[in-house]
Image: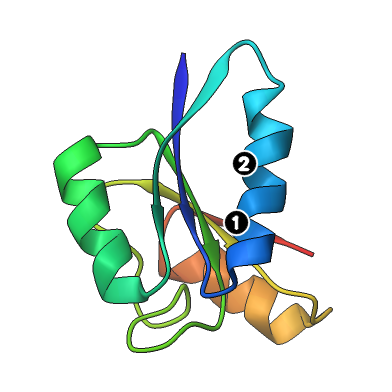
Amino acid sequence: MIRVLLADDQTLIRAGFRALLDAEPDMTVVGEASTGREAVRVAVREEPDVILMDIRMPDVDGLRRGPPDSSLRTLSPRNSSVLSAWCMTAMPCYHLL
């Protein structure tokens, strides 16, 4: 089972991803966060395998620093090669558009 943490400041976005992931038999959402700091707290408590995190959030976001010791996926509607390149060199990270 792949344990996923959803981190996005928009409730509707988190709900949409939760609906998609809940339909997958090998994935489970173990937590949600609306700020970067909350994402770090939830990640430490729940120890997810994957964090699906918005690239721009209040306080701490996917660009500044994702939660420790996790495979981080950043989300952005921006098609930016600079963001993708930064993400690939900064940490174990995948930039999803």
Residue kind at label 2, given as amino acid type: Arg
Query: Where residue 76 appears, x then y in whole percent?
Result: 71, 73
Mark number, residue 44: none
In the depicted view, which residue is nearer to us: 12 or 85? 12
Left or right: residue 24 versus residue 69 is right
| Image quarter hosting the C terminus | bottom right
In the depicted view, which residue is nearer to us: 78 or 15? 15
- Other residues around mark 2 within 10 Å, as few (<14) / some (14–19) / many (≥20): some
25 lies above or below 18: above
Residue 38 occupies quadrant: bottom left
Q: Is mark 2 on a helix, strand or loop?
A: helix
Residue kind at label 1, given as amino acid type: Arg
Q: Which residue is drawn at 18% across and 59% down?
A: 41
In the depicted view, which residue is nearer to us: 88 or 79? 79
Q: What element carries label 1?
A: helix
Give the residue at mark 1: 14
Q: Tell me how many marks there are.
A: 2
Residue 3 occupies quadrant: top left
Q: Which residue is drawn at 63% across and 26% down?
A: 22
Left or right: residue 69 versus residue 89 is left
Q: Residue at x 60, y 56 (%)?
A: 14
In the depicted view, which residue is nearer to us: 90 or 61? 61
59 lies above or below 2: below
Query: Where residue 47 appears, x then y in whole percent?
Result: 24, 37
Residues marked 2 and 1 touching at CB (< 8 Å): yes
Q: Which residue is drawn at 71% across and 22% down?
A: 23
Q: Tell me the CA gap for discs 2 and 1.
A: 6 Å
Left or right: residue 93 versus residue 32 is right
Query: Where residue 51 appears, x then y in whole percent?
Result: 45, 49
Give the residue at mark 2: 18
